[in-house]
Image (cartoon, rainbow, N blue to C red):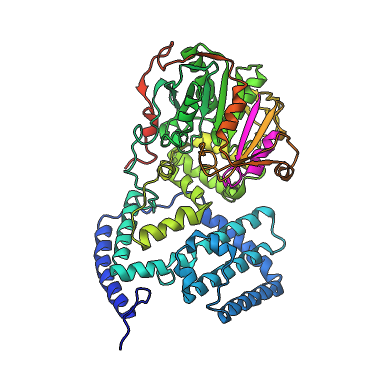
Amino acid sequence: MATQRTRDQFDPVQLSKSITRVAERSQKLVLEFLASPPDFSPAGFAHTAAAGSAFVSLTIRMMSDPMSFAAATFDLWSQAAARWRSIGAPVASDQARKDRRFKHSAWADKAIFEFIKDTYLIYADCVLSTVRGVQGLDDKTAHKVDFYTRQFIDAIAPSNFIATNPEILRATVDTGGENLLRGLGNMLDDLRRGKGRLAISMTDLNSFRLGEDLAATPGKVIARNELMELIQYEPATSEVRRRPLLIVPPWINKFYILDLGPEKSFIKWAVTQGHTVFVISWVNPDERLAHKTFEDYMLEGPLWALDMIEQATGEREFNTIGYCLGGTLLATTLAYLSAKSDDRIKSATYFGTLVDFTEVGDLAVFIDEHQLSSLERQMEKRGYLDGHEMAASFNMLRANELIWSFVVNNYLLGREPTPSDLLHWNADSTRMPATMHAFYLRKMYHENQLVVPGGITLDGVPINLRLINTPTFVLATIEDHIAPWESAYAATQIYSGPVKFLLAASGHIAGVVSPPGSKYGHWENESLPETTQAWLDGATERESSWWPAWDRWVSAFAGGTVPSRRPGSGALKAIDDAPGIYVRVKAKEE
């Protein structure tokens, strides 16, 4: 008696018929798309040229040592053959168990897919170890080769292809190929939305509204200039700490990373702790602000904000927070004020901030003389760097999570991306003014002049970070791919005043947006040895959020309490409801 075909068995004939029908319908869809094609113009960093040059150097070095390459090739085939002989035996490594690309049960339950997965992991390890073992490359070239090799390895993962991903195969059989048709439609929609650039949808952008679901903490815009709006938040307590708290966010993306949903909002939480919170909401600049400099961002950003807060509250002493690039600006501002013997800022907190750019992680592969010159020429033509181009570079730093997982979900499985407040923020990128951004990349990332006393001069003042004696709280995150924690720690050896360093779990965003009750803890160590390993060896791990630890620290600089202050009740009147108008401007208008 014929046995019934089980769900886990594929009918190749039926699958072939389904694919044929999908191909016919796909052809019609593509023809409709091509009837009004978007502009497929290239843009962004000179990734291709930089990678090509690095791999030429790699090839030359490998050819000079053919025996090492031959040995690596033999080792690869030996491991693959051994895995073939043991097919069906459970040999999954810790790496495979933790790899989210292979979480579907068939990768472990079905021998053929387990073999495909294990062979890929063997190949990936072998290629990376071979590349990393090549002698004679300078450090920058070796870093580029390693980075782009990882990009290639991630791209060819079997999870990214229909024929080698069991979940995609199952979906194709079950839906008669409709998943692929939906996926093609999703891809063409993304091409249209990106005007020729594949703007991969990471979330449902229609699921959140600013002022309602995100950036919804009650407050008022009390001041505005060309570069920023100053938002003051409504108090949540009858008394507040005397010294106001100014938050300086990065102008890459938008301030509401610190004001997501109410349960994740650092701003809302700080208000409930009795802080009078002010935040800078940066403008999303276009070609009209191409001339704006890093100096302008300091003078018209935090310095102007402090003057406005003084008018609004009558206070002349402040606590401050800077996040990422906003932290770099805050440190620069403090050095500027220190040189002028201006001690208005009584404490400074830094989230994921670099001031010493000696080691910047994988971002270094995008920043060399050739790529900077190319980028500067592009920015001079338009007056700015488009936010989507910078976002593409950041996404490459975590390609599996921020590129390939969405390729599989959206285009191969044909699913719609799920709503996510964090990914909505991530997609809400901003432009960078040409003059400011060229200065920042060249003088800080490329030449590391900020850490050199007098290496840069702003408003006629040589900037020397070692003059800063303000009490400082430095927060880094252990998995930060943008501001590596070892580099953030370097600031503890620079500032002259008392410094507390705290290391949070997770990465650049999740480690910061980690409210009480979240799954991420932190490490504390009151001493500040010269090396990060010594600090970590002596640190105590805490399972709780770092937020209360910071609040205990900053309470020493509160300056007592005063009756709560409502936005607009002082000399500055409210001119708009939070979150204001600047935050609503998109990076590229549709």
Residue 401 position (above or below residue 176): above
Q: Position of residue 226 (x, y in %)?
A: 43, 25
Q: Position of residue 485 (x, y in %)?
A: 63, 43
Looking at the image, the residue that sits furthest to the front is 1
Residues 3 and 27: in front is 3
Evaluate whether residue 197 shows in this view. Answer: yes
Q: Quadrant of the C terminus?
A: top left
The residues colored magenta run: 471-492
Instruction: Check residue 449 for magenta coloring.
Output: no
Q: Quadrant of the N terminus?
A: bottom left
Evaluate whether residue 458 shows in this view. Answer: no
Q: Is residue 470 left or right of residue 266?
A: right
Residues 90 and 455: in front is 90
Q: How many marks?
A: 0
Q: Position of residue 566 (x, y in %)?
A: 42, 16
Q: Residue at x 59, y 63 (%)?
A: 94
Q: Residue at x 61, y 29 (%)?
A: 331
Residue 35 position (above or below residue 275): below
Residue 254 position (above or below residue 345): below
Q: Which image quadrant for residue 3?
A: bottom left
Q: Position of residue 335 (x, y in %)?
A: 64, 25
Q: Is residue 21 left or right of residue 218?
A: left
Residue 184 position (above or below residue 584): below
Q: Is residue 49 left or right of residue 254?
A: right
Q: Residue at x 36, y 52 (%)?
A: 417
Residues 588 and 541: in front is 541
